[in-house]
Amino acid sequence: MERITAVARGKVQGVGYRHFIEGCAHATGVHGWVKNMPDGTVLMVAESSPASLADFIRLARAPAEDVIRVEDIAIIPGAATGEFRKFYVEW
């Protein structure tokens, strides 16, 4: 199991991106959370197998919704803690 911290930039707030990310996580078996940041980015912390995390980020980069515009997702790898049992939207 691995962990990533990811920051999405672009038109990612006020367009349903967090809920889209929650769906990506459920589809790929990833656990963790997603939340809006004051600077307009969206922060994600996710844990799963390397293959599942790669699928999760691939989906996160290419939303089907026209209103969402992901310009970049910066990824910082880390050690998994096993603290998550599900994926949720943090407020």
Image: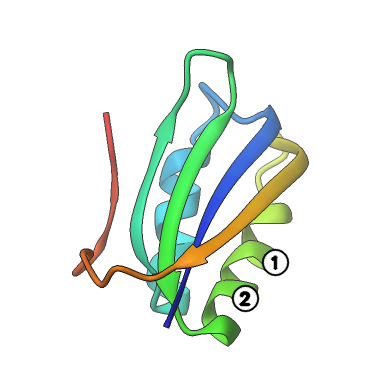
Residue at horizontal 23 percent and vertical 64 percent from the top? 84
Q: Which residue is mark 1?
A: 58
- Considering the image in quadrants, where does the N terminus appear? bottom left
Answer whether labels 2 and 1 touch (C-beta < 8 Å).
yes
Q: Nearer the viewer, residue 25 or 20?
A: 25
Of 23 and 66, nearer the camera is 23
Mark yes or no: residue 7 visible. Answer: yes
Q: From what the image shows, is residue 83 above or below residue 42?
A: below
Q: Is residue 63 in sight in this rendering?
A: no
Secondary element at image label 1: helix
Q: Residue at x 78, y 42 (%)?
A: 72
Q: Total of numbered circles in the picture? A: 2
Whole-percent x, y for residue 14 in the image: 51, 21
Q: Relative to 52, say whether 10 is above or below.
A: above
**What x and y, as percent, mark residue 78?**
50, 63
For the view shown, which residue lies furthest in the top direction? 38
Q: Position of residue 37 (x, y in %)?
A: 47, 22
The amino acid type found where label 2 is placed reads Asp
Q: Quadrant location of residue 82?
A: bottom left
Q: Secondary structure at mark 2?
A: helix
Residue at 64% from the left image edge and 39% from the top image edge: 8
Please give left or right for residue 24 compared with residue 55 in the image: left
> How far apart, in angstroms, are the residues tagged by discs 2 and 1?
5 Å
Residue furthest to the front in view is 79
Q: Residue at x 47, y 47 (%)?
A: 44
Q: Amino acid at mark 1?
A: Arg
The quarter holding residue 41 reads: top right
